[in-house]
Image: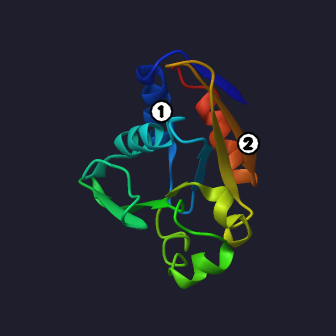
Amino acid sequence: MRVISDNPTQTQLAGVALGRLLQPGDLICLSGALGAGKTCLAAAIGRGWGAQPALTSPTFTLVHEHGRDSDDGVLFHIDCYRLRDAFDTMQAGLEDALSGQGPALIEWPERVGEALPEERLWVSLEILGPARRRLRLKANGERHKGLITAFQGLAL
């Protein structure tokens, strides 16, 4: 599935819509060049899910855990920019964040691809212009294919 966003507001609306669909065990991988909008999209996904506090760039902390007011759910926001490979992932203790206790968002997932579960939604962000982005969503596994189907059915 492909989505064209003409500005950050449209990217955020898409993220909020996706965030409302997340369930424990969902893994969303956000890939793209520096400045492509990964953290902007992650923050919007967190907002749609109900994350408290709001998601920000976790670059200096590998994993941020966010709760929400409506229940005792937890959303994991992971930034793998500083990791080199799957071995680093295991050394960093990401198993807990990927255990399925809550949904997980990973920025820079390509750095640790071998360590990621097969079941996931991969979102590639491509810069098309100063504010314009292309989001490509690719699902592995039935649950994540269902996420795309539900996402397509939402009015953005």
* Amino acid type, mark 2: Lys
For the residues bearing labels 1 and 2, Cβ distance under 8 angstroms: no
Q: Label 2: few (<14), some or many (≥20) within 10 Å? A: some
User: Residue 155 location in percent, x, y?
Assistant: 52, 19
* Mark 2 secondary-structure assignment: strand
User: Residue 43 location in percent, x, y?
Assistant: 38, 42
* Mark 1 secondary-structure assignment: helix
Q: Does residue 73 show up? A: no
Residue at which label 1 appears:
17
Q: Residue at x 57, y 57 (%)?
A: 26
Viewer-proximal residue, 67 or 9? 9
Q: How is the image coloured?
A: rainbow
Does residue 87 appear to the left or right of 52 in the view shown? Answer: right
User: Residue 83 location in percent, x, y?
Assistant: 57, 69
Q: Label 1: few (<14), some or many (≥20) within 10 Å? A: many
Q: Does residue 77 show up? A: yes
Up the image or down, 132 lies above or below 72; here it is: above
User: Residue 141 location in percent, x, y?
Assistant: 75, 55
Query: Is tag 1's residue or tag 2's residue first in the polypeptide sequence?
Result: 1
The Cα atoms of the two marked residues, 1 and 2, are separated by 16 Å
* Amino acid type, mark 1: Ala
Q: Residue at x 49, y 36 (%)?
A: 37
- The quadrant where residue 132 appears: top right
Up the image or down, 18 lies above or below 14; here it is: below
In the picture, the disc for residue 138 is: 2
Q: Residue at x 49, y 77 (%)?
A: 96
